[in-house]
Image (tube, rainbow, N blue to C red):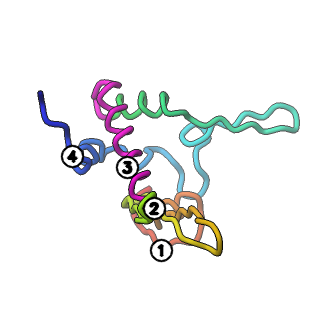
Amino acid sequence: MEPRQTLTEALAELSGVCRGFEGMPTKQPAADSINEAITIGQFQLEMSIDKKELVRRVSQRVNKGTGTVEEIIDATLEEIYSSLKQAESVSLRNFGTFYVRKERESWVFKFNPSQRLRSLFGWSSTYKGEL
């Protein structure tokens, strides 16, 4: 039986996914790149991608089979879940940090977006690189 990849190896293999969304403007996200916005009369519906679509897109980007990519995404999410369950924060460079903290009688889940992500949406940011 072939040894499984470590999480670090798997993330390195998929690192191209986190390098940015080509063609996205610096202040407003492109509707078809993040959420597809549909206006019907006075209502605006936002469509988000599900896991199956994420797997398909990553698969195309890295030229790997959907089964391989799905396994890597599942392992990544499981590792994030396990870390948060142990009250460890999870930092993903150029994306942000997930963490939990105890407040009064319950736990609170938090996400702190990276400077790059903040800049993408026009929020206060010190990021000067390419989006």
Label 4 element class: loop
The reply to whether the C-beta atoms of the residues labelled 1 and 3 are less than 8 Å apart is no
Label 1 element class: loop
| Residue kind at label 2, given as amino acid type | Gly
Location of residue 9 in the rendering, given as x and y in whole percent from the top left corner = 21, 46
| Residue kind at label 4, given as amino acid type | Thr
| Residue at mark 3 | 18
| Residue at mark 1 | 126
| Residue at mark 2 | 96
Sooner in the amino-acid sequence: mark 4 or mark 3? 4
The rendered magenta stretch, by its main secondary structure, is classed as helix
Q: Which is nearer the eye, 125 or 81?
A: 81
Location of residue 126 in the rendering, given as x and y in whole percent from the top left corner = 47, 74
Label 3 element class: helix
Query: Which quarter of the figure has residue 123?
Result: bottom right
Sooner in the amino-acid sequence: mark 1 or mark 2? 2
Q: Is residue 34 left or right of residue 114?
A: right
The reply to whether the C-beta atoms of the residues labelled 2 and 3 are less than 8 Å apart is no
Depth-wise, is mark 1 or mark 3 nearer the camera?
3
The residue located at (61%, 40%) in the rendering is 35
Residue 6's label in the rendered image is 4
Location of residue 117 in the rendering, given as x and y in whole percent from the top left corner = 50, 59
Q: How many angstroms separate mark 2 from mark 3 (CA)?
A: 11 Å
Depth-wise, is mark 4 or mark 2 nearer the camera?
4
Q: Which is nearer the eye, 10 or 123?
A: 10
Depth-wise, is mark 2 or mark 3 nearer the camera?
2
Against 42, residue 9 (above or below) is below
The residue located at (45%, 57%) in the rendering is 85
Sooner in the amino-acid sequence: mark 2 or mark 3? 3
